[in-house]
Image (cartoon, grey):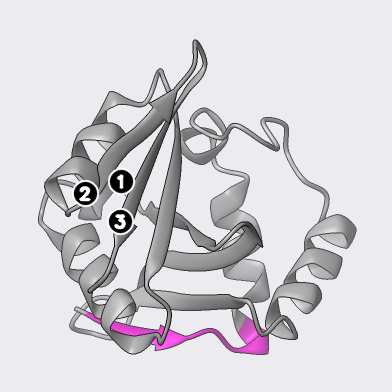
């Protein structure tokens, strides 16, 4: 397993992943399918944003199996978004990718906002050094400060 920075040609792959039912069902924002025009605008903005880092997660054969994104939206935190294809889950790939990505960046405050129906992600982030900052009836907010 490896991670690499996104390239322009990854746009369609990210578009396909974001519109998968298993992705949309756990999103707090964008719970409906996104059209390609809106995705292309978002992708271009993210590629040019110094406060966003996106990697493609590849298997040992260099086949894309997911993505990880850090995006500074507010405060001092970089929000974390991870997606792995179904057949790659529960193998430790997401933990390895998260740790590789965290070690590639120069910032140290991360935040994961998790929909309350997504207990698997909640447990994943706790297992990977995040702690509960606060919650409401719809979501958990977990943070990790890298030292």
- Taking the spot 36% from the left edge, 26% from the top edge, the residue there is 118
Report if the CB atoms under discs 1 and 2 are less than 8 Å apart: yes
Q: In the rendered view, does 76 fall on the left or right side of 48?
A: left
**Nearer the observer, 8 or 74:** 74
Disc sitting over residue 1 in the figure: none
- Image quarter of residue 4: bottom left
| Mark closer to the observer (3, 1) | 3
- In the image, residue 20 lies at what x, y percent? 55, 42
Q: Distance between the residues labelled 3 and 2?
A: 22 Å
Q: Residue furthest top?
A: 137
3 or 1: tag closer to the N-terminus: 1
Which image quarter is the N terminus in?
A: bottom left
- Taking the spot 25% from the left edge, 49% from the top edge, the residue there is 130
- In the image, residue 63 lies at what x, y percent? 34, 78
Q: In the rendered view, does 22 fall on the left or right side of 9?
A: left
- Taking the spot 49% from the left edge, 16% from the top edge, the residue there is 136
Q: How far apart are marks 1 and 2 (CA)?
A: 6 Å
Which residue is labeled 1 in the image? 86
Relative height, residue 143 to residue 75 (above, below): above
Report if the CB atoms under discs 3 and 2 are less than 8 Å apart: no
- In the image, residue 127 lies at what x, y percent? 12, 46
- Taking the spot 66% from the left edge, 85% from the top edge, the residue there is 50
Which residue is labeled 2 in the image? 89
Which image quarter is the C terminus in?
A: bottom left
Query: Dot 3: few (<14), some (14–19), or many (≥20) neighbours within 10 Å?
Result: many
**Helix, strand or loop under label 2:** loop
- Image quarter of residue 45: bottom right
**Helix, strand or loop under label 3:** strand
Which residue is labeled 3 in the image? 144
- Image quarter of residue 73: bottom right
3 or 2: tag closer to the N-terminus: 2
What residue range appears in magenta?
2-9
């Amino acid at each position: 397993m490896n991670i690499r920075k996104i390239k322009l040609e990854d746009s369609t792959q990210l578009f396909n992943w974001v519109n998968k039912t298993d992705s949309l069902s756990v999103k707090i924002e964008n719970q409906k399918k996104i059209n390609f025009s809106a995705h292309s605008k978002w992708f271009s903005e993210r590629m040019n944003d110094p406060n966003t880092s996106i990697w493609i997660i590849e298997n040992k054969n260099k086949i894309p199996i997911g993505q990880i994104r850090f995006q500074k939206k507010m405060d001092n935190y970089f929000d974390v978004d991870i997606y792995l294809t179904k057949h790659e889950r529960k193998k430790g790939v997401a933990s390895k990718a998260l740790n590789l990505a965290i070690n590639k960046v120069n910032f140290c405050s991360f935040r994961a906002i998790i929909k309350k129906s997504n207990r698997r992600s909640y447990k994943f982030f706790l297992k990977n050094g995040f702690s509960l900052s606060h919650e409401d009836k719809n979501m958990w907010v977990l943070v990790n400060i890298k030292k």
